[in-house]
Image: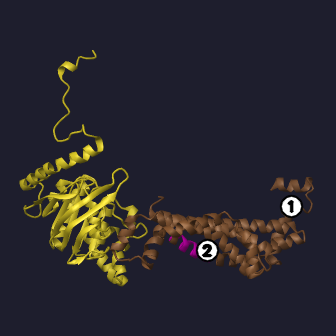
Amino acid sequence: MIEISNVGKSFAERNREHYIALDQVSFAVKKGEFVSLVGPSGCGKSTLLNMIAGFEKAETGIIEVNGHKVKGPGPDRVVVFQEHGLFPWLTVLDNVAFGLKQRGLSKKERHSIALEQIKAVHLSKFIDRYPHQLSGGMKQRVAIARALAMDPDILLMDEPFAALDEQTRSILQKDLEEIWVKTQKTILFITHNIREAVMLSDRVLVMSTQPGKIKKEFIVQAARPHSIGDPLIHHLESKITEELADELEKVVREEMGDEYRIKKNTFSIPSVDSMGFGI
Amino acid sequence: MIAWDLGYRYLHWGWKFPSPLQTYQAFVDGFTQGHLWGSISASLRRLLISFVISIAIGTTLGFLFARFRFFDQTFGFLVVALQTVPSIAWLPFAIIWFGLNDTAVIFITTIGATWTMSMASRTGIMNISTLHIRAAQMMGTGNGFRMFFQVMIPAAFPHLMTGIRVAWAFAWRALVAGELVAKGVGLGQMLQDSRDIGDTASILCVVIIIAIIGTISDHLCFKRLEDKIMLRFGYIK
């Protein structure tokens, strides 16, 4: 179980004095719950995840995992990164077994656990391959197997499927949901893909940007496994999209200037009178 | 070969430069009756000792440079300066400290290879992606020896390999230079002894042997190892 209370973080930037990345963020994730964080890029969702993982420190506030304050990275909270982060010098089997080796397990023990996890992500045929010999989707499967082999309480997933093509992504989403149902792990999932969030989660937290805050919470009350045809899923998806539109506009305006609008259709079809201008 | 032989015959080099035949003879004599084998093995022994020391020191130094900014800005800067000093320039010191013996030669050979190795390992370790470090930390390597040997060394291996190849070449040069002055048995000493008696055929013979050993060791040993690693990492197909 993850408990986050009043967490804040700011970065020093060149132009502005202080850029507040996260401002008084509080939420909790229950044991065995699948929660997604969605928000526009730059809203601090990855920073938040890195702080829970222990890679970065919170400036203010408290992050607790299972009642203990987070002090650094640990095998109870394993991250699946966007860019797999597998070791290129190890085979699939050794990559998955790496964490178990650190735990001091014998070769036989760790290989049997690793093989089991590799089987769970359907890669048994590829145990002797090196990461560069695998496709993007397969690498991400190995990363998931590596995380599960550690048998952590919590899986932290930082846009794990963002770099994959649409087909691969939907297959992996299905597999992840299955794994989650089977293992009952607590999962905090970060994405900017609203459909992905709704399809996978029990609860979706929408973040606002500048400063990063939790803006709204949506509970997905659809039956498991979530189906893409479920009207409830569709309804939620459009509600969250609407909620995020304001935030997206903020981001776009920040990048392109004030004249840009995405909320209302501002591009007009050239009218008939202006057509004959050059003729 | 023909041009060389013609040059010898018609330009009257005399004893200053040997003919191909004389060189060949020197080879045969050196290997059958002379002490060429002894010299080669003595030189290689010194080379290997210094090489192992300089790789160990160089890698450690590089690691310290990459990890500690202060150390990098002080001693790291000094190393760049030291790198420009030909290692033979340390020979007078080496002679004063150790005498005209093996230790002095091993000392300057080590110095010749260490700095370049430390720079290569510094680059290698600095270029390790944060992602790999984080992944290792969360899997419980800690930040000590296990992180160093199981993650940092393999992750930096492509750079380290380049460093090792250059260090080998540098060590070779320093070794021969040192041996020219030092007493004992070795290829450098053989060059010097042959000069004393005006045996140019033997001199050329030793030069050729140095070139051959250098090339063979680089090609058969290091290049193969490097290719294998690059293939495994997926840098080449």
- Tell me, yes or no, whether the highlighted magenta stretch contains residue B55: yes
Report x, y in % for residue A112: 31, 79
Q: Which chain: yellow?
A: A
Q: Colour of chain B?
A: brown
Residue at mark 1: B19
As measured in the structure, the alpha-carbon distance from the residue carrying label 1 to the one carrying label 2 is: 39 Å
**Looking at the image, can residue A92 be seen?**
no
Q: What residue type is labelled 2?
A: Ser
Residue at mark 2: B54
Work out whether residue B50 or residue B209 is closer to the camera in this orientation and state it: B50
Q: Quadrant of the N terminus of chain A?
A: bottom left
Question: Residue, x 75% and y 69% (percent of image)?
Answer: B177
- Tell me, yes or no, whether the highlighted magenta stretch contains residue A55: no
Magenta-colored span: B52-63
**Looking at the image, can residue B63 be seen?**
yes
> In the current view of this chain or complex, which residue is farthest to the front?
A17
